[in-house]
Image (tube, rainbow, N blue to C red):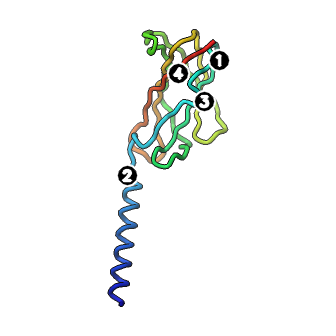
Amino acid sequence: MKSKLVLRATILALASAIATSQAAKSAPEDYEFQLVENEIKEGKGAVVAVKLVDKRTGAPVENAVVFTTRMDMAPDGMEAMTSPVEALPSGDPGVYRFKTDLTMAGGWRFSIAAKVQGEPETVERRLEFKAVQ
């Protein structure tokens, strides 16, 4: 009886250790930036909002350090047409907001790169949306 209890405790401890090691191993592919809106009104001072989520849990990821952004019209074949991007505060967990000038209607691409707390690799994404009148 005692040996069965020891064996059961050993198996539970091993299963717990495996689960913990699997949870600790994450990669950039485990995180995803998603557009909050796929259509944004064109014009000066347009706001583009993106969510950063942990794809394993669906939970929002807060406090990521966004260090690279780029806004261009690559979807419409005008990659050289860019617009400056400025970070804005956000009150929603895992939502990152940016101000830019969408100078004309059409397809735009927002490229973003960030570091997630505790992760060694960079999370990057290119998101395409439409600027509408």
Cα–Cα span, label 3 and label 4: 15 Å
Q: Residues within 10 Å of mark 2 (few under 14, many from 20)?
A: few
Q: Residue at x 59, y 27 (%)?
A: 37
Q: Earlier in the sequence, mark 1 or mark 3?
A: 1
Cα–Cα span, label 4 and label 1: 16 Å
Cα–Cα span, label 3 and label 2: 29 Å
- Mark 3 element type: strand
Cα–Cα span, label 2 and label 1: 39 Å
Q: Amino acid at mark 1?
A: Gly
Q: Position of residue 19 (x, y in %)?
A: 39, 61
Q: Position of residue 29 (x, y in %)?
A: 39, 40
Q: Which quadrant does the N terminus fall into?
A: bottom left
Q: Position of residue 107 (x, y in %)?
A: 50, 15
Q: Residues within 10 Å of mark 1 (few under 14, many from 20)?
A: some
Q: Residue at x 49, y 34 (%)?
A: 33
34 or 81: nearer the eye? 34
Dividing the picture into quarters, in which one does residue 14 lie? bottom left
Dividing the picture into quarters, in which one does residue 105 lie? top right
Q: Earlier in the sequence, mark 2 or mark 1?
A: 2
Q: Earlier in the sequence, mark 4 or mark 1?
A: 1
Q: Which residue is mark 4?
A: 129
Q: Which residue is mark 3?
A: 97
- Mark 2 element type: loop
| Label annotation for residue 25 | 2
Q: Which quadrant does the C terminus fall into?
A: top right
Q: Amino acid at mark 4?
A: Phe
| Label annotation for residue 45 | 1
Q: Earlier in the sequence, mark 3 or mark 2?
A: 2
